[in-house]
Image: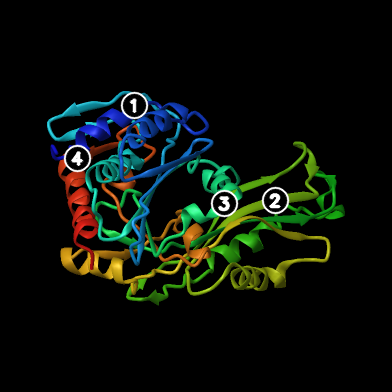
């Protein structure tokens, strides 16, 4: 069998547009190829594709990645210059998908049973995630002893992830004419106390399994005012909180409510409007530990949120490991290099073929 060329496959995948909710074409392409692989059983649920081996192995490794991209920014087409591939989704995460596809097509006798998961709509709100479609129809397809997601990590292992929470703080006031402001209460002015709370926040930096996480609390939106000559009677502040995996969302919400409690009146409201849980590092998993040790891989905490949290919530250790630079994702300069793709492919190939 000819050795796969995952870099070339990355270019092929980039050439197939797959903006969120428009992923049918790329899933059709993947299914056509994987349906021909004799050692794999494929299942399609909507625009989600799962290819699995059923060889009776003691352990199962899941490699997963999302097929969608953000909208194009004058970077829709694939362009290769030397060993660099430019184009939408090249780093996030068609390089990772190409590695997965190359492994799935070429390794017929893996040391573990394998699941190759290609899922839809990761780049939009979590409520649209294709993972929910799979859970709703056949959750057993996602069972594994370890899940590795091919998010761009520059070839390092990014362990676990931080949770994310979005709060809406609504402060009340009383309307009055701006010529007689003492007759009212300016809700916008009351925001200064809320901003003091945010500015005074001392970030936590817990170290978990050797990985330092760094929590954050940031205002992201302010609204208020009804007219140029009216003291506003309402102002809202939206802020985001990043939560390390040493505490759950309930603990984090209690912390947030506590630090704002002294400035709130009975008419004010602090609402949690969106959240996603953190995920533990999972570095003690034998498969993950073996891969890190054999290849002397760097390990760091994942400060953002990824779908590793989905697997962690299901009791499956998970980590992020893929080619590409995450800082280039979603930018007009998005690109990936051949050495990055090849290196990731060889690390995973070694793990799958040789085992622990």
Q: In the rendered image, which residue does mark 3 sit on?
A: 135
At horizontal 21% and vertical 53% (from top left) the residue drawn is 349
Real-space Cα distance between discs 3 and 2?
36 Å
Q: Assess whether mark 2 and mark 3 are in contact (beta carbons under 8 angstroms).
A: no
Q: Assess whether mark 4 and mark 2 are in contact (beta carbons under 8 angstroms).
A: no
At horizontal 31% and vertical 23% (from top left) the residue drawn is 77
Judging depth in this view, the residue of 354 and 274 nearest the camera is 354
Q: Is residue 206 left or right of residue 351?
A: right
Assess disc 3: are there few (<14), some (14-19) or many (≥20) residues with their C-alpha within 10 Å of its C-alpha.
Answer: few
Q: Earlier in the sequence, mark 4 or mark 1?
A: 1
Q: In the rendered image, which residue does mark 2 sit on?
A: 236
Answer with the quarter of the image where residue 350 lies.
bottom left
Real-space Cα distance between discs 3 and 4?
34 Å
Q: Earlier in the sequence, mark 2 or mark 4?
A: 2
Assess disc 1: are there few (<14), some (14-19) or many (≥20) residues with their C-alpha within 10 Å of its C-alpha.
Answer: some
Q: Nearer the viewer, mark 4 or mark 1?
A: 4
Point out which mark residue 337 bears: 4
Q: Earlier in the sequence, mark 3 or mark 2?
A: 3
Real-space Cα distance between discs 3 and 1?
34 Å
Q: Nearer the viewer, mark 1 or mark 2?
A: 1
Q: Is residue 121 above or below residue 249?
A: above
Q: Which element carries disc 1, helix, strand or loop?
A: loop
Q: Assess whether mark 2 and mark 1 are in contact (beta carbons under 8 angstroms).
A: no
Which quadrant does the C terminus fall into? bottom left
Q: Is residue 22 left or right of residue 284?
A: right
Q: In the rendered image, which residue does mark 1 sit on?
A: 75
Answer with the quarter of the image where residue 289 lies.
bottom left
Q: Is residue 247 above or below residue 139?
A: below
At horizontal 25% and vertical 55% (from top left) the residue drawn is 110
Real-space Cα distance between discs 4 and 1?
16 Å
Assess disc 4: are there few (<14), some (14-19) or many (≥20) residues with their C-alpha within 10 Å of its C-alpha.
Answer: many
């Amino acid at each position: 069998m000819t050795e796969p060329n995952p870099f070339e496959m990355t270019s092929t995948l980039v050439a197939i547009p797959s903006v969120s909710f428009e992923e049918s074409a790329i899933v059709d392409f993947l299914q056509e190829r994987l349906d021909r692989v004799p050692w794999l059983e494929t299942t399609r649920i909507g625009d989600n594709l799962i290819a699995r081996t059923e060889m009776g192995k003691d352990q199962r490794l899941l490699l997963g990645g999302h097929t969608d991209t953000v909208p194009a920014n004058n970077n829709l087409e694939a362009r290769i210059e030397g060993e660099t591939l430019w184009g939408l989704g090249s780093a996030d995460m068609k390089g990772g998908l190409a590695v997965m596809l190359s492994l799935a097509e070429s390794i017929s006798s893996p040391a573990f049973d394998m699941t190759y998961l290609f899922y839809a709509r990761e780049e939009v709100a979590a409520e649209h995630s294709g993972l929910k479609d799979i859970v709703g129809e056949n959750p057993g397809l996602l069972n594994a002893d370890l899940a590795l997601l091919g998010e761009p990590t520059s070839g390092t292992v990014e362990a676990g992830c931080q949770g994310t929470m979005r709060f809406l703080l609504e402060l009340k006031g009383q309307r009055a004419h701006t010529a007689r402001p003492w007759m009212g209460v300016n809700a916008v002015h009351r925001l200064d106390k809320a901003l003091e709370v945010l500015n005074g926040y001392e970030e936590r930096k817990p170290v978990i399994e050797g990985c330092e996480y760094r929590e954050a609390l940031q205002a992201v939106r302010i609204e208020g005012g009804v007219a140029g000559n009216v003291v506003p009677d309402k102002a809202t502040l939206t802020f985001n909180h990043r939560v390390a995996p040493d505490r759950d969302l309930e603990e984090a919400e209690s912390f947030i409510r506590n630090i704002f409690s002294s400035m709130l009146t009975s008419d004010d409201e602090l609402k949690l409007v969106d959240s996603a849980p953190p995920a533990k590092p999972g570095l003690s998993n034998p498969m993950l530990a073996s891969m890190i040790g054999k290849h002397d891989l760097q390990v760091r905490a994942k400060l953002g949120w990824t779908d590793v949290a989905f697997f962690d919530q299901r009791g499956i250790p998970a980590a992020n490991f893929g080619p590409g630079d995450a800082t280039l994702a979603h930018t007009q300069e998005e690109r990936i290099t051949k050495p990055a793709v090849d290196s990731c492919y060889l690390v995973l190939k070694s793990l799958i073929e040789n085992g622990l």
